[in-house]
Amino acid sequence: MVAPHEEHRCGLVALVGRPNVGKSSIVNAVCGRKVSIVSDKPQTTRHRIVGVANRPGVQLVFVDTPGLHKPVSALGERVNSTALESAGDVDVQCLVLDATARFGRGDRWVAERLDLASTVVVVNKCDRARPEEVLAALGAASELDAEAYFPVSARTGEGLDALVEHLAARMPSGPALYPEGTDLPDDELWVAELVREQLLAVVRDELPYSIATRVTEWEWPRVRCDIIVERESQKGMVIGRGGSVLKEVGQRARAQMPAGAHLELRVKVDRDWQRRPDRVERLGY
C-alpha cells in the first residue's frame, strides 16, 4: 500500500541478450514464481513473455524476450523480430550477459541494437563463475559505456535486490498496469510453453527445435495441448515406447498447473513447419 504522499511508479523492463544467458531465470526470480520456461538448451523462449513484480510504491512489468541469434529458419527470423520489437517499446532495456562465457561478437551484435546510454548491463550466473571471470566480464562489457552494471545470480538471488532497486528508481510516475497480486501468466500460452519446457527436458537433443506446442481446447479444468513436430519419425520419439515419454511430460506439466487440471496431450506432424513462414505465423510466433 502506498502512503498518500508517496508517488507510485510503474513501467516496463525488457531483458535482451543472446540465447541461454538466463533472462527467463532472472524474470522468474524477481517475480517470485515461474513466468517463463527455463532450459539449458538455447532458444528456449520464443514468445514475448510478461511477468509482474510488485514492490512498495512501484510495479515492474518485465518483458522476457527470446534470445537473439543468427537465424537459419523462418522461425528464427520471427523469434529475432519478436525480441527486437519487444525491447524497443519499454522504459528500461537490460542487456543480459553470461559471466561464464567470453564477451564476444554475438553480445556486441545485440548491444548495437540497444540505446546503450540508457541500457543496464546485467552479468548473470555469477554463482557459477570464478571472481576473476566476473571481473573480466564486467571489464569487457565496460566498452559499451552503458548506464549501469550489475553482477547477479538468478539461481541464488545474489545482486537481484540492487538491480530491482535501480530499475524501480528508473520507472516513470504512474498507476499500476496490473492489479496487485497479478503475476502473469496463467493462460493458454503459459500451459503450451510449460509443456514445451518439459519436452525440452525429456526428449533427445536433436529434437527440441522441431517442436511447437499449442493449446487447442480450454474448458477448465480440461485442457488439450497439441505437440507439433516436423516428421513422422519425430512423432514416435515424442510419444516414446508405450507412450512413456508423453506420459512423463504430462505428469511433469500437470505438477506445475493448478490442482485439478486435466491435461490431454496430442502429437501431430506438420512437415518442416519451422521453415515455412505461414506455418510459423499460424502457430503463434
Image (cartoon, rainbow, N blue to C red):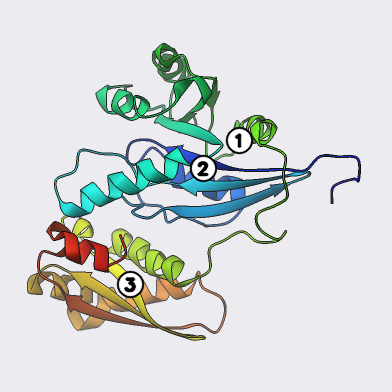
Labelled pair 2, 1 in contact (Cβ < 8 Å):
yes
Quadrant of the image for the C terminus? Answer: bottom left
Q: Give coordinates of residue 112: x percent, y percent.
A: 34, 24
Asked whether the viewer can see residue 197, the reply is yes
Labelled pair 3, 1 in contact (Cβ < 8 Å):
no
| Left or right: 271 as drawn, with respect to 120 | left
- Above or below, comparing residue 263 to residue 85 in the picture: below
Q: What residue type is disc 2 on?
A: Ile
Asked whether the viewer can see residue 41, the reply is no
Q: Which mark is residue 26?
A: 2
Q: Indicate which label's residue lies in the foreground, 3 or 1.
A: 3
Q: Which residue is identified by label 3?
A: 214
Residue at coordinates 49% horizontally, 71% vertically from top-left? 187
| Left or right: 59 as drawn, with respect to 223 | right
Q: What residue type is disc 1 on?
A: Leu
Q: What residue type is disc 3 on?
A: Arg
- Disc 3 or 1, which lies upstream in sequence? 1
Q: Give coordinates of residue 281: x percent, y percent.
A: 25, 63
- Above or below, comparing residue 275 to residue 59 in the picture: below
Q: Indicate which label's residue lies in the foreground, 2 or 3.
A: 3
Q: Give coordinates of residue 93: x percent, y percent.
A: 49, 34
Q: Give coordinates of residue 262: x percent, y percent.
A: 46, 85
Q: Which residue is identified by label 1?
A: 160
